[in-house]
Amino acid sequence: MLKIEELVSLKPYNTFGIDVKADYFITLRDEEDVRRLLRESYLRSNRFFILGGGSNILFVGDYRGIVIHPDMRGIEVIAEDENHIEVKVAAGEDWDSFVAYAVQQGWGGIENLSGIPGQVGSAPIQNIGAYGVEVKDTLLAVEGYMLDNQEFFRLNNFDCEFGYRTSIFKTKLSGRFLITAVVFRFTRRNHTYNLSYQGLSRAVQNEGDVNLQNIRKAVLLTRETKLPDPRKIGNAGSFFKNPVVGQGKAYLLKAEYPEMPLFESEKGKYKLSAAWLIEQCGWKGYRKNDVGVYEKQALVLVNYGSASGEEVLELASNIQQSVHQKFDIELEMEVNIVA
Ligand SMILES: Cc1cc2nc3c(=O)[nH]c(=O)nc-3n(C[C@H](O)[C@H](O)[C@H](O)COP(=O)(O)OP(=O)(O)OC[C@H]3O[C@@H](n4cnc5c(N)ncnc54)[C@H](O)[C@@H]3O)c2cc1C
């Protein structure tokens, strides 16, 4: 039997801590639950939303429909040799607990992605990234079901169409594909450490030797000083993506604002710092009632207690407008808005 609850508060299920309700809430505990769900006709007659750890969404009202919450667990080694190991992880596993487990096992590749909230099944959706590493770098395949025809698919890395904070699951397959498991390929020895991110190398040296454990420790410490803990202050991490612009626009801005951070991304394109742009518009540390911009990181919008989703969205749109007016740059939201 599927576990279906009615009129469920979603406050404990979103890191912004927005107090809204879902008409129905279904928890998927195992693969059998997934198959039961796929057989149900109400999936075709109701709107639904897949909710992982709720750390990359903003609810702007009660959800009139079915919220599906994957809670399938399991970590399975499916292939290994001297140098590499392939591991299949169920979608409902907690991402950071899995990173901790991988580091403890001596599996290299995701240590820089320590401390990111959410579930393993959500990691491919926006191709989570931090400290110079993205999940696509170790991801071999994504498994799941098309919800419109119940067909099972295994998409390999190339099929997932990964990009900066995006994938096919955010574009063509948005809301249509239920991820049930992710398959990774890690190194077991001769790890290639990525310490390219400014300051990370020094932070790791402070911990001692360069190894998986010390990289994880350094990343966790660095994150702690910059980002608010959602258990204390509601937030969903970076609210906006860093804008990517062409060379012409990048050089024009750099000539006008020589101190502006500018990073070369794909060929001929440049990534700007959304946090810097927002800060220049005077938003850092802004607060109105219970909604605000985090004082240590302008990219993070926060709920100090009882802010509504609409209030957060209004602030986000005001920030977009002022960045547009000052720099002629469109800030794109990274957080998914759920109405
Ligand atoms: C403090 C903080 C720091 C963060 N730092 C980072 C960071 O450094 N890098 C980064 O990339 N992100 C970061 N994030 C954002 C967020 O943690 C990631 O995007 C994470 O992968 C979201 O996982 P989730 O399970 O919470 O997904 P949710 O917020 O529940 O869902 C996100 C999207 O994925 C879809 N989805 C979820 N599970 C499935 C599934 N099984 N099948 C199909 N669709 C699904 C949802 O429908 C939704 O569209 C941060 C967030 C916070 C709060």
Image (cartoon, rainbow, N blue to C red):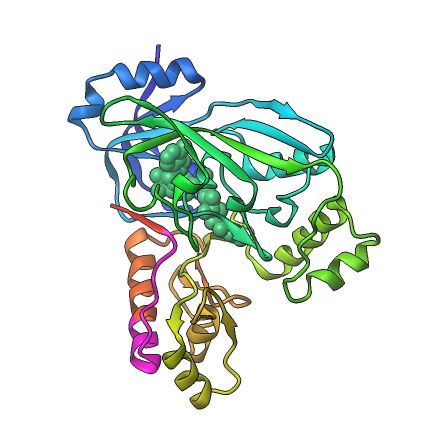
Quadrant location, the C terminus: top left
Which quarter of the figure has residue 106?
Answer: top right
Query: Which residue occupies the extreme left position in the image?
Result: 45
Q: Residue at x 79, y 52 (%)?
A: 210
Q: Residue furthest right?
A: 208
Front residue of 33 and 159: 159
Tell me: residue 183, above or below residue 40: below
Which residue shows up at 43% across the image and 90% down it?
Answer: 256
**Residue 314 sits in quarter:** bottom left
Does residue 10 appear in the picture of this structure? no
Residue 238's place in the image compared with 12, above or below, is: below
Task: Count how many numbered circles sit on residues in the image.
Answer: 0
Residue at image coords 57%, 41%: 138
Any magenta on residue 277?
no
**Image side of residue 230 versus residue 11, left or right:** right
Q: Position of residue 299 (x, y in %)?
A: 46, 64
Q: Ligand 1, what quadrant?
A: top left
- The answer to whether residue 2 is left or right of residue 78 is left
Whether residue 24 is visible here, answered yes or no, is yes
Residue at the extreme top: 1
- State the quadrant of the N terminus: top left
Provide the residue span drawn in magenta.
321-335
Return the residue nearer the eye: 159 or 295: 159
Residue 232 image offset from top left, x and y in percent: 54, 50
Q: Position of residue 125 (x, y in %)?
A: 41, 43
- What percent of the width, then of the height, locates residue 269? 42, 70
* Residue 321 vertical placement versus 217 (above, below): below
Q: Is residue 326 magenta?
A: yes
Q: Which is more toward the observer, 67 or 234?
A: 67
